[in-house]
Amino acid sequence: MKLMEEKILREGEVLSDDILKVGSFLNQNIDTEFLGQMAEEIAHLFEGKNVTKILTIEASGIAIAAAAGMSMGVPVLFAKKHRTSNVDGTVYSAMVHSFTHGEDYNVMVSRDYLHADDRVLLVDDFLASGNALRGLMSLGEQAGAELMGVAVAVEKCFTGAGDAFRAQGIQVEALAAIESMSKDGIVFRA
Amino acid sequence: MKLMEEKILREGEVLSDDILKVGSFLNQNIDTEFLGQMAEEIAHLFEGKNVTKILTIEASGIAIAAAAGMSMGVPVLFAKKHRTSNVDGTVYSAMVHSFTHGEDYNVMVSRDYLHADDRVLLVDDFLASGNALRGLMSLGEQAGAELMGVAVAVEKCFTGAGDAFRAQGIQVEALAAIESMSKDGIVFRA
């Protein structure tokens, strides 16, 4: 999505070789017209895949997932984060390690809302370490649901996580895929 | 919004005299077609008010706020919750007491995204104690922004918080306003 690359070049801010700030339009202040365009693009990329549910994770994935769900006409389920592993039998849960915050947390969804007949698209703002997405994949597996793919706003290709998913046969789509970045500039995947 | 009352009667679950479970369509699993209808209704209720920004709070307010922002053509800013009061000069912050979780937390937004010329609509899923909304109002005041009103999916009228805001001259709109509820049924405000 050329549009996302242009948006990042215009409004994003590279804070270091691995931190890109997009708070002005994506994950704190949300440009809703642009959000609608992102959603249409995600719907287009997974057209014909008969996705029945979008699964995301609080908090910054929710807006993109909600918009994509409206474009695709499917419900959106968001996993909650908890620091405790104090879970009961009413939820599916998975442990995730956050590199950003240097801690482990649990992601969980109620068993009521994820089922074996679901065809699930994972949506998030960033694909970096891939750990959050691996947690969501585990939730889907526990429910016996089918993984139809992953859509993210921004992929940091240099982590290798997105390509590792692709090597497993998973359709991974990034609206902008960054090969490298520094204060001198950003190189997008061709 | 008659539609929301019907949805609650059909899919909501009264767990106690003050807890209504709406996870099946509103705050965990999101019915995106219904989300679009809620957004249109919020846009209609604040038509002509020249709202420039929607302010909400993570996590369960984000989907409604994002959808309303798309309907109204305005950006959406979401305040983050932090347990620490360790804030710096780059943010506006306010302390909020959560009755649900029995703890205090900070809400904060970057000063970059909220300004004195903003005409702010607050959006959230529930209006119960009103504490989260009071925190958001404080953020707006700190920025010198103008409060144009409050839109929530569900108001628990029996707390009195919504009416206290109205008595201050604030336009408070609830898509469903619950006067009382118990396992025997729900009484909506006429």
Image (cartoon, coloured by chain):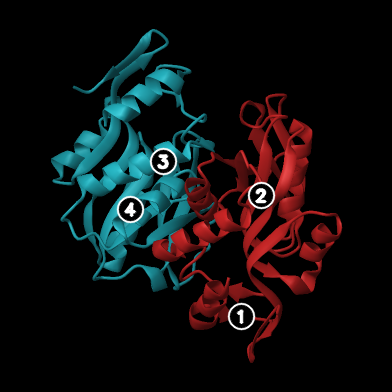
Chain colours: A red, B cyan
- Callout 4: SS: helix
In the picture of the structure, the residue carrying the numbered disc 1 is: A15
Task: Report how far apart the C-alphas of labels 1 and 4 lie in the structure.
Answer: 33 Å
Residue A125 spot, x, y in % from top left: 60, 60
Task: Report how far apart the C-alphas of labels 3 and 4 lie in the structure.
Answer: 11 Å
Q: Furthest-top residue in view?
A: B184
- Callout 3: SS: helix
Vertical comparison of B81 with A115: above or below? below
Image quarter hosting the N terminus of chain A: bottom right
Which disc number belongs to residue B35? 3
Q: Amino acid at mark 2?
A: Leu
* Chain hosting mark 2: A
- Which residue is pictured at 17% across the width and 56% down the height? B49
Residues at discs 3 and 1 in contact (Cβ within 8 Å): no
Q: Amino acid at mark 1?
A: Leu
Task: Report how far apart the C-alphas of labels 4 and 2 lie in the structure.
Answer: 24 Å
Q: Label 3 crowding class (10 Å Cα cut-off): few <14, some 14-19, many 20+?
A: many
* Chain hosting mark 4: B
Residues at discs 3 and 4 in contact (Cβ within 8 Å): no
Return the disc, 3 or 4, that comes first in the chain's sequence.
3
